Amino acid sequence: MDFTVLVLRFCSLFGILFAGLAHGLEITSGGSTSIEKASMESVKLDCQFTLAPEDSGPLDIEWSLLASDNQKEDKVIILYSGDRAYEDYYPPMKGRVHFNSADPKNGDASINLTGLKSSDTGTYQCKVKKAPGIRSRKLLLTVMVRPSKPRCYVDGVSQEGKDVILKCVSSEGTNPLQYTWEKTSDTKLLPASAVLDPTSGTMNVKNASAGASGTYRCTVKNRVGTEECIMDLRVVPPPNTAGIIAGAVIGVLLALILIAIILFCCCRARNRKKYEKETSYEIREDVPPPKSRVSTARSFTSVGSQRSSLGSMSPSNLHEYALKPQYDKIPSEEYERPPSHAPPPPGKMAGPNLSRMGAIPVMIPAQNRDGSIV
């Protein structure tokens, strides 16, 4: 009997203690703990709580970005303590994170995060502390990048009878990206031989024909956005290979002929210039050298001086003067001419004979072949 009463009292005390704990600080937010948002959007991370009368300590609210590596520390992004909010606590999110309520102590510890970036992806923890109670809630935020506008183009040639490859590439966007192709002209049906790859964005039209020509649209999408591009495809007949080869051969031959003509003209002009240069230096034996005014004046001067000197000479002195060697006379024509063209020497006359005939010796200055005085 006493044992039964003891058990009942213990159970009653345990129930009272459990009821007190159950009605302490609690976080009441529900719903999904995983959120996906696109970049540059805004998100609300919900964290609602209730307090019990026995929670009499100061209220502290702390939001932190949990580190993916256990060896790193968690990063506190916003804080409420001592009836004051500290919103610029984390520099990378400065100006982008705020409490949802102007007075979080009324039970709303939710925050708003604006201008989302891909680097904001991570696990966020809301921790509410009011002694002796303490509760926390974790939320997974995934910031996805919308696909950028793709670029559509033909990879290679688009000729009949060959495989034509159409490509669609988006440079930005969070995977997985999904690509689709459709024809928007004519029958709006893709060619029967078309093979699509939704992951890489390529469409291979095997053994393409002229019927594959038309307008095509490529659409790329992920869980947060969609973009598209449009292109025109023209499948042309293959070129005339034989005509191209013949034209190339004829062009090469014409080029070689033109080069040969230019070389021939250059060589001929060079030889003509060389011939004219040699001819200008050739001596004409049948043309006498030109007379210069200086040589004529000198000859008159020398004649006058010799006349004055001869006037004081007697016939005997004249004979001696004629026999003296003349160093300033020009070489005779027989020394200038080649042996094969030298004329027979005329008969020499003695000095006395010249004086009897009334001849007067004249000194003639020497000249070279072009007529200038030496």
Image (cartoon, rainbow, N blue to C red):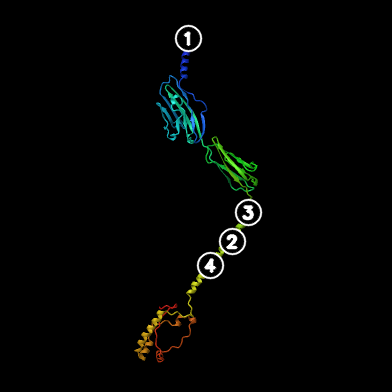
Q: Which mark is residue 254?
A: 2
Q: Position of residue 353 (x, y in %)?
A: 41, 91
Name the quadrant of the C terminus: bottom left
* Type of amino acid under label 2: Leu
Earlier sequence position, callout 4 versus callout 3:
3
* Type of amino acid under label 3: Thr
Query: What's the CA distance linking mark 4 and mark 2?
Result: 20 Å
Secondary structure under tag 1 reads: helix
Q: Which mark is residue 29?
A: none
Report the mark closest to the observer, 4 or 2.
2
Answer yes or no: is residue 328 visible: no
Earlier sequence position, callout 3 versus callout 1:
1
* Type of amino acid under label 4: Cys
Q: Position of residue 20 (x, y in %)?
A: 46, 17
Image quadrant where residue 306 sits: bottom left
**Mark 1 — residue?**
5
Secondary structure under tag 3 reads: helix
**Mark 3 — residue?**
241
**Mark 4 — residue?**
267
Residues under numbered marks 4 and 2 in contact, where contact means CB atoms less than 8 Å apart: no
Query: What's the CA distance linking mark 1 and mark 4?
Result: 136 Å
Image quadrant where residue 224 sits: top right
Residue 168 vertical placement versus 346 (above, below): above
Query: What's the CA distance linking mark 3 and mark 1?
Result: 110 Å
Most extreme residue toward the bottom, as rendered? 356
Q: Residues within 10 Å of mark 4 (few under 14, many from 20)?
A: few
* Type of amino acid under label 1: Val
